[in-house]
Amino acid sequence: MNTPQIICGDFNTDEKKVDNYKGMLTILNAEDGVISGIKKFIFDDESNDAFRSTHPNPRLIDYILTRNSNLIQWISRRVAIIKLKWGKGTEYLSDHNGLETFIVFRKGDYLSKVY
């Protein structure tokens, strides 16, 4: 296939559980990449006021994966913490932080083609 593909979402697969994480990548035939920036966790039940656990375990469970990554010139991934005061002192809008990506494709016309 000659088209780069982006697969992203809430996979609920903890990267610390190596067999499950590698199995997910194999099933999806996808590659993962490094999270840049200071925050490295999507599910952060230690600081997130939308969900608190008695045994906090910050972890990465959502991903931006790629297929045909040789067709991607550059990609960055980072955790995006989106907050807004609401309710009784609550700020976080979800129990997961967001993920954002910036992508530069090797060829600029991938998005202009309709298949």
Image (spheres, helix red, strand yellow):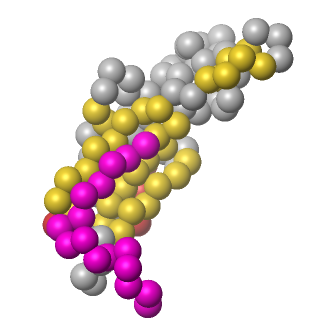
Does the image show residue 80? Answer: yes
Across the whole image, how many numbered discs are drawn on residues?
Answer: 0
| Residue 18 x, y percent position in the rendering | 35, 42
Q: Residue 82 vs residue 31: left or right?
A: right
Image position, residue 50 (x, y; %): 70, 22
Q: Quadrant of the N terminus?
A: bottom left
Q: Residue at x 20, y 72 (%)?
A: 107
Residue that protrudes farthest toward the right in the picture: 87
Nearest the eye: 47 or 111? 111
**Quadrant of the image occupied by residue 108:** bottom left
Is 115 in front, or is 61?
A: 115
Q: Residue at x 44, y 87 (%)?
A: 114
Within the image, what quadrant is residue 54 found in? top right
Specify the segment rendered in magenta.
100-115
**Residue 17 seen in render:** no
Looking at the image, which residue is at 17% across and 67% down? Answer: 106
Indicate left or right for 73 with 23 as reference: left
95 on left or right of 115? right
The front one of 32 and 26 is 32
The residue at 62%/23% (across/down) is 83
Q: Quadrant of the C terminus?
A: bottom left
Is 89 above or below relative to 82? Answer: above
Compared with 62, 6 (above or below) is below
